C-alpha cells in the first residue's frame, strides 16, 4: 500500500509539473505511452489541413482507462470483424459501379508505393474494375520512388501525374515550415484534394483510398463507415482557408501569388458537383496489413524498397517516394516527441510483426535521428532567394535556409513540457524506453 501511495504521489507531482510548463498545440500536459504499442498521447490526429494555423489546437490519440490507444483497439477489433461479409459488401459496391469496359469506373490516388499499388492492382484483377490512377507529385522524387511510380504504370495502369508549379510549391512548403514546422503540408493538401477533383473532371463516381487513418490513431468511431469524411476534401468559403499557415488572401496580396496558382491545393466546392462522388476506404472492406501490401507489390509489380534504411527509423519500404519525407518525421519528433521509428514500430506491433519490447528498442536506437542524407538539397529547396521570389522573399526575416537557421527555427517549436536542455543538448523528458 505504501508503494501504491508513493507512486500516486509521484503521478500528482508529474501532473502539477506538466501543468506549470507551457504546453504547445493543445497537447495533453501529462505524457503517457500506450501499454500495448509505443505511441504516446501526444500523437495528433489527422486534421483538415486547409484550416491549419499556428494557433490550431490538436486533437490527439485517445488512451482508454487501461492505458491502451485507439489504434491498438482498432487492431483488436479487426480480429473479430467478419471479413467475408465486408468483402461481399465490396463486391456489391463494385457491381454497382462496374462499367462495360468503355470507360474508367473507379479512381485510385497514390504514388505507386506499396499501398496504392496493392489497391489498384487488386481492384483491377480480382474485382474486375477499371481504375484510373492519379498522383500528386512528391516535392523531390527519390530515385527509388520514381522507379516504383514507373513500375506501377508498367503494371497496366493509366495515370495522371499532377506536378504543381515548382515555385509556388516551394513557397508554400517554406511557409508551412516557417509557420507550422510542417514541411509535408503542401503534399498532403494535394494528395487529399486531387482525387475528388479528378473524379469530378472525368465523371468517375467512385474513389478508393487505402486504409483509414483510424488504423494509426484517429478516433476509433471513424472505422464504423467506409466513407471518407467530406470535410477533408470540400470547402465552401475561400476566406476561411489557409495554406502554409497563411490566409489565402494574404498569399495573393503579399507573396506575389495569383489565385489560379493556388487552385491545385484547394479542395472541391460541393456546389460544383453535378453528380455524387463516393470516397471509400478499401481498408474498411479488406483486412489491411502494410507488410502484406509490400510483398504483394514486390510480387506483382517489382516494387523496390529503398537501398538504405530511412533516417530516424529502421524500415526501408514505407513512405519512401519524397526526399522531404525524412524532414516531415523529424518535425513530428520536434513538436510532439514522436519520430518515425515510433510510428513504424507502433504499426508493426499492432500488426503482430514485432513485439513491444522490440519496438521500444528500435525507438531508443533510431527515433529523432537528424535526416542528413538529403539535408543540403532540402535547405536549398526551402530557400526563397530574391531573384526567384521578388515579392515573397521580402516577407521572410531569413529567406535562405541553412542548417543553423533550421535548427534555430526548430527550437521555437519545441514544447517545454516535452523538452529540456541537458549539458547544452535538447533531450526529451519522457520516453517510452525510460518509463
Image (tube, rainbow, N blue to C red):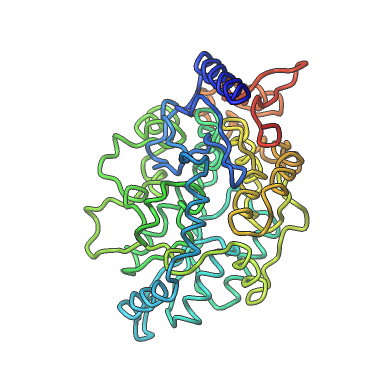
Is 13 placed left or right of 107 in the picture? right
Q: Is residue 401 above or below residue 324?
A: above
Quadrant of the snapshot with the C terminus:
top right
Determine the image quadrant of residue 304: bottom right
Quadrant of the snapshot with the N terminus:
top right
Q: Foreground residue, 186 or 250?
A: 186
Determine the image quadrant of residue 257: top left
Q: Which residue is situated farthest in the top direction here?
A: 20
Residue at the image point whose x is 54% and y is 23% from the top: 396
The image shows residue 179 at horizontal and vertical percentages of 50, 28
Residue at the image point whose x is 41% and y is 59% from the top: 195
Q: Foreground residue, 215 or 111?
A: 215
Is 29 placed left or right of 94 in the picture? right
Q: Is residue 370 above or below residue 350?
A: above
Is 356 placed left or right of 22 in the picture? right
The image shows residue 213 at horizontal and vertical percentages of 46, 52
The image shows residue 124 at horizontal and vertical percentages of 48, 79
Q: Which residue is situated farthest in the front direction here?
A: 1
Determine the image quadrant of residue 432: top right
Q: Foreground residue, 167 or 283?
A: 283
Residue at the image point whose x is 48% and y is 68% from the top: 133
Q: Is residue 168 above or below residue 316?
A: above
Amino acid at each position: 500500500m505504501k508503494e501504491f501511495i508513493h507512486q500516486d504521489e509521484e503521478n500528482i507531482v508529474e501532473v502539477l509539473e506538466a501543468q506549470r510548463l507551457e504546453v504547445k498545440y493543445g497537447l495533453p500536459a501529462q505524457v503517457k505511452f500506450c501499454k500495448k504499442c509505443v505511441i504516446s498521447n501526444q500523437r495528433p490526429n489527422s486534421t483538415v489541413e486547409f484550416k491549419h494555423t499556428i494557433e490550431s489546437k490538436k486533437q490527439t490519440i485517445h488512451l482508454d482507462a487501461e492505458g491502451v490507444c485507439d489504434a491498438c483497439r482498432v487492431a483488436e477489433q479487426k480480429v473479430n470483424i467478419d471479413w467475408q461479409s465486408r468483402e461481399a459488401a465490396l463486391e456489391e459496391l463494385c457491381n454497382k459501379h462496374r462499367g462495360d469496359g468503355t470507360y474508367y469506373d473507379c479512381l485510385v490516388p497514390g504514388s505507386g508505393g506499396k499501398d496504392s499499388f496493392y489497391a489498384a492492382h487488386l481492384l483491377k484483377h480480382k474485382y474486375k474494375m477499371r481504375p484510373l490512377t492519379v498522383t500528386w507529385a512528391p516535392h523531390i522524387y527519390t530515385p527509388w520512388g520514381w522507379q516504383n511510380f514507373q513500375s506501377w504504370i508498367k503494371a497496366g495502369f493509366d495515370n495522371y501525374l499532377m506536378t504543381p508549379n515548382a515555385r509556388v510549391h516551394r513557397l508554400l512548403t517554406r511557409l508551412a515550415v516557417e509557420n507550422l514546422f510542417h514541411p509535408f503540408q503542401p503534399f498532403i493538401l494535394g494528395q487529399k484534394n486531387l482525387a475528388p477533383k479528378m473524379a469530378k473532371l472525368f465523371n468517375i463516381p467512385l474513389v478508393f483510398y487505402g486504409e483509414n487513418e483510424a488504423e494509426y490513431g484517429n478516433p476509433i468511431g471513424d472505422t464504423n463507415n467506409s466513407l471518407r469524411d467530406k470535410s477533408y476534401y470540400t470547402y465552401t468559403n475561400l476566406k476561411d482557408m489557409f495554406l502554409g499557415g497563411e490566409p489565402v488572401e494574404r498569399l495573393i496580396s503579399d507573396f506575389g501569388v495569383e489565385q489560379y496558382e493556388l487552385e491545385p491545393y484547394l479542395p472541391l466546392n460541393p456546389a460544383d458537383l453535378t453528380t455524387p462522388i463516393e470516397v471509400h476506404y478499401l481498408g474498411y472492406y479488406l483486412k489491411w496489413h502494410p507488410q502484406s501490401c509490400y510483398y504483394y507489390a514486390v510480387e506483382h509489380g517489382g516494387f523496390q524498397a529503398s537501398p538504405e534504411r530511412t533516417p530516424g527509423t529502421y524500415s526501408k519500404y514505407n513512405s519512401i517516394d519524397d526526399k522531404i519525407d525524412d524532414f516531415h518525421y523529424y518535425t513530428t519528433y520536434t513538436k510532439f516527441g514522436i519520430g518515425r521509428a515510433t510510428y513504424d514500430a507502433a504499426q508493426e506491433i499492432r500488426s503482430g510483426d514485432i513485439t513491444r519490447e522490440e519496438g521500444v528498442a528500435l525507438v531508443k536506437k533510431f527515433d529523432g535521428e537528424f535526416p542528413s542524407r538529403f539535408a543540403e538539397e532540402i535547405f536549398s529547396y526551402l530557400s526563397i532567394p530574391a531573384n526567384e521570389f521578388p515579392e515573397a522573399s521580402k516577407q521572410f526575416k531569413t529567406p535562405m535556409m541553412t542548417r543553423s537557421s533550421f535548427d534555430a527555427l526548430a527550437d521555437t517549436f519545441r514544447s517545454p513540457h516535452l523538452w529540456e536542455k541537458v549539458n547544452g543538448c535538447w533531450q526529451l523528458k519522457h520516453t517510452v524506453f525510460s518509463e
